[in-house]
């Protein structure tokens, strides 16, 4: 099981990365805006070093702007990762103008995650491109009335096809129950918000049981 923390807020990183349950961190312009950051002004060198210092093995960040600017931006992200000793992954949205940039990005050595996936057919695109990951927006799919669980079954089947190297990294999860149901299907790679991480880490019944244990140890029972 590989879990990633989906946040641009370094306060979330500081609080949750030391739990040891996350292998990496993912982010994008929307998450940066929610964290009060200007995405074009982010110092990826600093971000990569912080992520590495907190134990992350990967940092995923999304391209932005004109497609012909992706290569230069990706170079800076890769350089930041190399200097920090962390693998940086370039997130590319699943729209045609961006898809057309992937061969050139791969040629310059970029690990690739295809993002903003809403349909199982897009898994075929990611697989044909040889992308490392694809990120289906599971919660948004459900909220749009799409057959999200069926799509996840289809995408998982593609991972078993000959020559496929693309791993499904499910994003936009709303609660821990969705994680459990998708894990039961066979999925093992997720990126989750801090709020969902808190759901995983906390259970009132476990807290009550530990309180009872402590009372027993202290001779209070």
Image: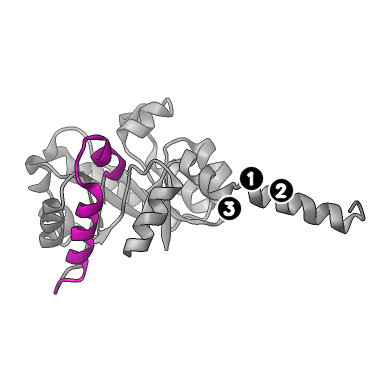
Whichever of labels 2 and 3 marks the residue nearer the N terminus, that label is: 3
Instruction: Give residue 29's position: percent from left, percent from top.
Output: 31, 33
Residue 187 shows up from this direction: no
Residue 53 shows up from this direction: yes
- Mark 3 in CB contact with mark 1 (< 8 angstroms): no
Give the labeled residue for mark 3: 19
Main SS category, magenta section: helix
Q: Residues within 10 Å of mark 2 (few under 14, many from 20)?
A: few
Q: Nearer the viewer, mark 3 or mark 1?
A: 1
Quadrant assignment for the N terminus = bottom left
Instruction: Give residue 110's position: percent from left, percent from top.
Output: 23, 56
Element type where label 1 sits in the image = helix
Give the labeled residue for mark 2: 208
Residue at far front of view: 221
Q: CA distance from mark 2 to mark 1?
A: 6 Å
- Mark 2 in CB contact with mark 3 (< 8 angstroms): no
Give the labeled residue for mark 1: 204
Q: Residues within 10 Å of mark 1 (few under 14, many from 20)?
A: few
Instruction: Give residue 193's position: percent from left, percent from top.
Output: 43, 41
Q: Residues within 10 Å of mark 3 (few under 14, many from 20)?
A: few
Whichever of labels 3 and 1 marks the residue nearer the N terminus, that label is: 3
The part of the chain drawn in magenta is 137-162
- Mark 2 in CB contact with mark 1 (< 8 angstroms): yes
Q: CA distance from mark 2 to mark 3?
A: 21 Å
- Does residue 165 show up magenta in the picture? no
| Quadrant of residue 108 within the rendered picture | bottom left
Query: In this figure, which colouring scheme has been used for the structure?
Result: one colour
Element type where label 3 sits in the image = helix
The residue at 21%/54% (across/down) is: 150
In the rendered image, the vertical position of residue 26 relative to residue 133, given as above or below: above
């Amino acid at each position: 099981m590989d879990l990633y923390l989906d946040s641009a807020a370094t306060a979330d990183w500081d609080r949750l990365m030391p739990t040891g349950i996350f292998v990496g961190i993912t982010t994008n312009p929307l998450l940066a805006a929610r964290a009060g950051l200007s995405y074009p002004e982010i110092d990826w060198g600093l971000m990569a070093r912080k992520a590495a210092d907190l134990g992350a093995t990967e940092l995923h960040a999304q391209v932005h702007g004109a497609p012909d600017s992706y290569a230069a931006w990706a170079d800076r992200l890769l350089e930041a990762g190399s200097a920090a000793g962390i693998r940086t992954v370039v997130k590319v949205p699943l729209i045609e103008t961006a898809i057309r940039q992937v061969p050139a990005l791969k040629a310059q050595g970029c690990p690739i995650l295809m993002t903003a996936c809403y349909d199982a057919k897009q898994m075929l695109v990611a697989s044909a491109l040889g992308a490392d990951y694809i990120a289906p927006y599971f919660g948004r799919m459900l909220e749009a009335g799409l057959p999200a669980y069926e799509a996840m079954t289809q995408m998982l089947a593609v991972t078993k096809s000959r020559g496929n190297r693309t791993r499904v990294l499910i994003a936009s999860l709303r609660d821990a129950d969705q994680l459990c149901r998708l894990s039961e299907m066979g999925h093992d790679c997720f990126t989750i918000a801090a709020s969902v991480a808190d759901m995983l880490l906390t259970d009132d019944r476990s807290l009550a049981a530990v309180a009872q244990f402590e009372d027993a140890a202290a001779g209070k029972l």
